[in-house]
Image (cartoon, rainbow, N blue to C red):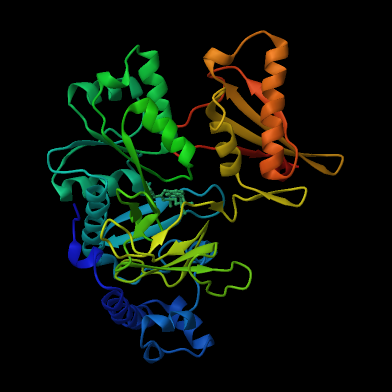
Amino acid sequence: MIWNPNKECMSRDEMRALQGKRLQKLVTYVYHNVPFYRNKMQAMDVSPEDIKSIDDIVKLPFTTKQDLRDNYPYGLQAAPASEIVRVHASSGTTGNPTIVGYTRKDIAVWSEVMARCLTAFGVTREDTFSVAYGYGLFTGGLGAHYGVENLGATVIPTSTGNTEKHIRLIRDLNISGIACTPSYALYLAETLDKMGLRKEDIGLRIGAFGAEPWTENMRKEIEERLGLKGYNIYGLSEIMGPGVSYECSEQNGSHINEDHFYPEIINPETLEQLPHGEQGELVFTTLTKEGMPLLRYRTKDLCTLTNEVCACGRTSVRMGRIMGRSDDMLIIRGINVFPSQVESVILEMPEFEPQYMLVVDRVNNLDTLQVQVEVRKDFFSDDIGRMLNMKKALADKLKSVLSISADVKLMEPNSIERSQGKSKHVIDKRMLK
Ligand code: DLL
């Protein structure tokens, strides 16, 4: 099923014409309502009249997270305060949080794009859907919630916390779908085990997983343990929240809601636009947003784009999985390392739980990497020879994938802290010194 075939299956020419028209309108709007953009455009000698088609987007300035922080709290807001009906804020561990205001129309667009995602995952009005993303300033909870309601399924706003009660609700209310982070999905599976229940005791069918990077192996693991089909959903609060892109039944990249969020891939160093297929930093322009529209927002997320035809019938550009964020990328002894590479290796080995932590340090001016990983209950033993072999096997695989050697530390089952929201996989002690 396709929620909005008019938009999701538009011909490429029509889509580009629509994007061009919307971009022109957007640029005029921000030029007149956001001094930050007017000043930037004037400094670049660009005026709204210079934007005639979507290709002219390259003439426009970029926006960064730092710009949002520097203009805290409402400096980039384009709509008057009286038009703002909701505010979310993104976490961020340092500096000012990022504040995002939405108008009534923004919320309607968000509910529309979320309904497109859920429909692509196979959710219908007959489903009962649990939203287990955090409700609050984080966009996950309320964003998904409005989408489920808009679609007409029944929403159960479980949020995070009290996982045992959640599992009882899943069983007793015949909940068929769940939206949460992939790491919470795993925690749910563990709790199910602990409660002595099997996946057959609950009827979960569909998972809408996102808000953090995850791998194909992680998908297999969650699907196997929860007995559902897991779909990727991507988004970020600065642009809207969940619903910027979504997988279809082909699961070959995520379709971008391109009539609202225009994607580009750039080389993060030269800032040049890159052709489809090349990996770089993902950049979005919000084509229809009123509250806090952004021009060419640099997400720091690294991926590729493609507009090869998709068998599902949707014509939109798709993005590959997020390889990591340019600021998540660890540089260890000069080599780029993404936590997702380590995750893939760990999940290929049946001995390990998908629970791990990378601890990076600097000893005598040399970077060190320790990979702590939990051994599955069935494989954990006091046979030292066996444990040493396991450790060596993982260390060898890591070395061949990462090109640097890592010290592997085998951990007892259930010893690494679980996360209900976005999980943390890196402790970089170098930054603390
Ligand atoms: O995480 C919005 C969201 C909620 C998306 C629920 C999906 C589901 P932020 O807190 O602003 O917003 O974090 C955005 O999270 O730039 C990516 O680095 C990462 N991210 C989000 N979805 C995915 C995904 C929400 N499917 C940042 N795969 C983004 C990989 C993701 N990374």
Residue at 67% x, 35% y: name it.
Answer: 397
33 or 290: which is nearer to us? 290
Q: Is residue 354 left or right of residue 23?
A: right
> Where 415 falls versus 25 (above or below)?
above
Is residue 141 visible in this depiction of the protein? Answer: yes
Query: Which image quadrant: the C terminus?
Result: top right
> Where 16 falls versus 218 (above or below)?
below
143 or 407: which is nearer to us? 407
Where is residue 19 shown, x and y percent of the image?
A: 31, 76
Residue at 54% x, 37% y: name it.
Answer: 424
Residue at 54% x, 19% y: name it.
Answer: 376
Residue at 34% x, 27% y: name it.
Answer: 226
Which residue is the extreme one toward the right?
364
85 or 243: which is nearer to us? 243
> Where 309 falls versus 405 (above or below)?
below
Which residue is the extreme one toward the top?
382
Where is residue 283 shown, x and y percent of the image?
A: 47, 66
Where is residue 259 shown, x and y percent of the image?
A: 29, 69
Location of residue 308 by image quarter? bottom left
Number of marks in picture: 0
Is residue 420 visible in this depiction of the protein? Answer: no
